[in-house]
Structures are given as structure tokens and as C-alpha cells.
Image (cartoon, rainbow, N blue to C red):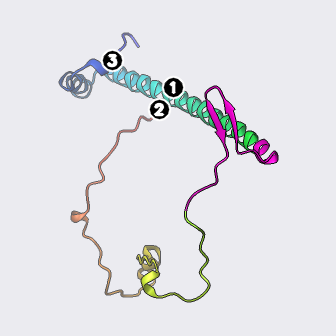
Amino acid sequence: MSGTLDVASMSDEALDALVSQAIIQKSVTCSNNLWEAIEQADAVATANKQLEEAARCRRNNAEAEAARIKERILFHLQARDLKALPSSFGKFARQANGGHKPLRITGEFPDEFARIKREADLDKIRQAIKEGECLEFVEFIPVEDLPNKGEHLRLKS
């Protein structure tokens, strides 16, 4: 790039003027600058994503290591039937897992104790319509009532 285009500090008006110049005046220089600015921003985004992934790996590794240490301490406390191990910072204490007591359903139960979620199987409905079935409970949404999905810009080289 002949000069780095600092789009981040550009106002929308200045950027619009540059895009207009590229389009109206067919300025290849402006188009090239815009292209390179997009590539540069994408490269920064990719580099940041890689840094985030590396940080996530380091965090996961650290969490796994802490869990492994706790597991080994618990194992040794259980093996020696000890409830706690003191340290200068506090103590490691065995603790029973909490939560609700487990339940087992052994017979029929009334509907008032059932959780029922009914939802339409859209794939099955589409297949039935495709096969020529007339489903009175379905209507097609007119295109003009659909939200505009919009467009995006793709760089093709």
C-alpha cells in the first residue's frame, strides 16, 4: 500500500467520500487503498482471534491443572480418612457434594407433574406440503412481510 489508510480514525463522511471517489471516478488507487485497509483489518482480527484462542488454551490448561491437584489431594484425604489438611492460607476440606436428593419415577404420574413442550416439526410440514398435502393450519408468509435479510460485501480475488 502506498500509504497506510487509517480508516479507524476516519469519519464516516471521509470514508464515504473515498468510496464515492473509487466508484464515481473509477479511481483504482482509492479502490486499492480500500481493499488493503479491509485486508489489514481482517489480518488484525485474525491475529487477535489466534491470541484469544491461545489464551483460552492456557486458561483451560490452568483450570485442568488446578482440578488435577484438587483431585489428588481429595484422593489422599479419602485414602487416609482425613476431613481436612491445613495450610498457611487456609485448609483443604473434604466436602460432600450437594444438590437435590436423586429421584426415580417408578410408575405413572399425573399430568400436573409433567413437563410438556409442543412445537411444530417444520421439516415434516414442509415435506407434507411438497408431497401435495393441504395443511389448513399452515400458511405461507408473503415475501413482502419477511424481514429484509440484507446484503454483505465479499472480496473476490
Left or right of 12 on screen, residue 59: right
Q: Indicate the secondary structure of the residue bearing disc 3.
A: helix
Numbered circle sitting on residue 157: 2
Task: Tell me the residue at 46%/83% (across/down).
Answer: 131
Depicted 81 relative to depicted 114: above or below? above
Depicted 68 relative to depicted 149: above or below? above
Numbered circle sitting on residue 131: none
Measured in 3D between alpha carbons, the distance from the residue under mark 3 to the one under mark 2, in whole angstroms, is 17 Å
- In the foreground, 40 or 105: 105
Which of the two discs, 1 and 3, sits closer to the camera? 1
- Which amino acid is tagged 2? Ser
Residue 85 covered by magenta stretch: yes
Question: x, y (%) of residue 9?
Answer: 27, 18
Task: Tell me the residue at 43%/76% (across/down).
Answer: 117
- In the foreground, 15 or 74: 74
Which sits earlier in the primary sequence, circle 1 or circle 3?
3
Measured in 3D between alpha carbons, the distance from the residue under mark 2 to the one under mark 1, in whole angstroms, is 21 Å
Residue located farthest toward the top when viewing the structure as drawn: 3
Numbered circle sitting on residue 47: 1
Q: Which residues are magenta?
A: 75-99
- Which amino acid is tagged 3? Thr
Quarter residue 63 falls in:
top right
Question: x, y (%) of residue 43?
Answer: 47, 25
Q: Indicate the secondary structure of the residue bearing disc 2.
A: loop
Q: Which residue is mark 3?
A: 29
Which sits earlier in the primary sequence, circle 2 or circle 1?
1
Q: Using a 10 Å C-alpha cutoff, classify the residue at mark 3 as few (fewer than 14 neighbours), some (14 to 19) or many (20 or more).
A: few
Residue 13 covered by magenta stretch: no
Q: Indicate the secondary structure of the residue bearing disc 1.
A: helix
Quarter residue 7 falls in:
top left
Which of the two discs, 2 and 1, sits closer to the camera? 1
